Amino acid sequence: MIDVAVIGVGQTRYGMFPGRTLKDLFYEASREALDDVDKGLDPNDIDEAFVGTLSTGGAQLGNFAPLMMEAAGMVGVGARHVENACASSGFAMRDAVSAISSGSADIAVAAGVEKMSDLPRERNRLWLGISGDVEWERLAGTNFAGIYAMMARRHMFEYGTKISHIKMVAVKNRQNALENPKAQFRSAFTMEQATKSPNLASPLDFSDACGITDGASMVILARADLARSFTDQPVLVVGSGVGSDYVAIHDRTSLTKLQGAVDASVKAYEMAGIRPEDIDFAEVHDCFAIAELLSYEDLGFCDRGKSGIYLESGITQRDGKRPINNSGGLIAKGHPIGSTGTGQICEVVNQLRGRADTSARQLANVGYGLTHNVGGSGAAVAVHIFKAME
Amino acid sequence: MIDVAVIGVGQTRYGMFPGRTLKDLFYEASREALDDVDKGLDPNDIDEAFVGTLSTGGAQLGNFAPLMMEAAGMVGVGARHVENACASSGFAMRDAVSAISSGSADIAVAAGVEKMSDLPRERNRLWLGISGDVEWERLAGTNFAGIYAMMARRHMFEYGTKISHIKMVAVKNRQNALENPKAQFRSAFTMEQATKSPNLASPLDFSDACGITDGASMVILARADLARSFTDQPVLVVGSGVGSDYVAIHDRTSLTKLQGAVDASVKAYEMAGIRPEDIDFAEVHDCFAIAELLSYEDLGFCDRGKSGIYLESGITQRDGKRPINNSGGLIAKGHPIGSTGTGQICEVVNQLRGRADTSARQLANVGYGLTHNVGGSGAAVAVHIFKAME
């Protein structure tokens, strides 16, 4: 297997940009990624591209990947669109890595984009329902908040997790986002405010959920043995794993475990030759605050059922031993569906290179960084592990 | 690079099945593919899946691949949806091949499905427009027939190609389909009938176009060194290449050449270490009859501009030296968008194993078989080359 390295990353600011287009956002992310390749890269040297988006709502566009690559001035690159709901670009990353490690590409692009603000709020809620099981969840009247609320309620029942644990996730991530110039929600947010947030789907309140977000991101990858000709700071992809599960949560054996995340992380750890305790920091998929707690357990950071206590210990705070969602996560950095997976990778790569956008956000201890990207309520999960190239 | 082999293929009949569902079609193709693995395969041993569909029309489904894999009884396989309009499953195949040749999967599935009959005819025409450039072609009032009509008219102008050449493609493919039990259009069709077909978009008539089709197909792949433990007749994937181009035809340098197809085939030939003249038979993307003529030139089977004469010589007939679209092609076998790429591969693999469904259809000379799958009007193209394992 040929080793793969990240040689450049780019991401737009995340937010609601009603006046911007898919192409415009994608272009901006691609320019930043190209500029980020320190020693320069001719777009004509890119062999393949993998573009993640859900985009079956507002933007009904076929040949989506060639269309976006054209907007980025990268015409002629063999490109395809990869869809796995909220894990679309996590899987785009997985397949870009495989393209290089198979030997069929020397340089590949993984990217993602979503434009959610072109639908009214109510339509967005309906649209997002397509990422659950349409027949058995969406048409039965459940939306994603309801699905994650059931997971939260069950976790509380099985393990004694408290509502305050859930709120602590939201407070931590919103505070982290204060220092992130690319985050969507950047206003001070305290536990007191969290307890006053209107109810969304009990036990989840509005402030426990991500919002409606536009944004794009791009990761440029190369064969590791070529990477230093493009940058002095390549970042190795040391682990990559994917997993899937039943789409509807009622078909699964547990409501408090995402088997797809467990499977994906086991494979990624195995490939990297490391264990969960070796991970120094991570960006995890906190579409709802409860999802971050589940991730601590699925990724093996703490024992099953102990995520509330683990969080309470402060270990996942920015100044803790294993900072989680230092970017602000999906809740505060934002969750432009198709962009989220590669957006997480932009954050981890920048941290590993010591290039966080503000010094307040730069982590000190950055050996291994992990990304955890979940599609729907766990139907598909992609986990990647990164390390600066020595 | 690890060699990859096909160990089983399955395909539903193609046709209009208003009472059938996406899941139902996908299940049938998956069962046939599993049954086709002579020595048996436990679905739990499948590592990854790549599922092609356009499906942004009638079926707005996220996490599409896990949903289909669940219907096939293949839950837990790391699965993603690959979209590239009409080349969706050609690219799914490409990425399944990379997953194995990278060493990250031992067994992978490439599949495709489309359910077109759930939209009324007029809606289908509009829906298919999303595979062109929505802003510059679809919204300007052009549909796919119009786009291919412009290519046809230009080919006639530049090279003296005649309307009768275009009609000969349709007649050949419809006659081929007569013997294919899985083809959609199986009624006798003569040149006389072709000349009486109503006009669609001059110079193309209705009989020069594919129809509205439902169907699914699946290809099961394994590391070549493991293949014989699954079947006595593995088929090697000796070549794989993809290419892309501008989505709108007015942005391209030529209306009579698909640069993406040229690029994809050059890469596939190079990987296989062969030349165009080594290909014994092929399934090409004849969404419109003119597209088959262009493919002869893009794939290097004949000189630029000479496809009409090449066809006239009889070489691409079933009893000719290089039969093309022996299955009936998209025009007569059918074109269920997302299924077409892997459906072509089912045909080529069965021919290479001497397992054509009727003896009348079995080709005698089957060294190298090629598939050519085009997305939109050439925005993305996947080419694969196959050979029976010795």
Image (spheres, coloured by chain):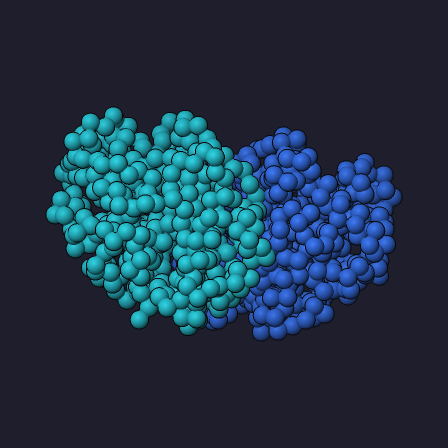
Chain colours: A blue, B cyan
Asked whether A187 or B97 is in front, the reply is: B97
Q: Position of residue A99 (x, y in %)?
A: 46, 61
Q: Quadrant of residue A317?
A: bottom right
Name the residue rendered at 62%, 51% in the picture: A246
Q: Position of residue B141 (x, y in %)?
A: 37, 27
Q: Is residue B106 left or right of residue B389?
A: right
Residue A164 vertical position relative to residue A371 in the rendered view, above or below: above
Asked whether A252 or B242 is in front, the reply is: A252
Query: Can residue A333 be seen at all in this image of the molecule?
Result: no
Q: Is residue A387 left or right of residue B293?
A: right
Q: Quadrant of the C terminus of chain A?
A: bottom right
Q: Position of residue A166 (x, y in %)?
A: 80, 49
Name the residue rendered at 55%, 55% in the picture: B74
Q: Is residue B375 left or right of residue A177?
A: left
Q: Quadrant of residue B265?
A: bottom left
Name the residue rendered at 45%, 38% in the picture: B115
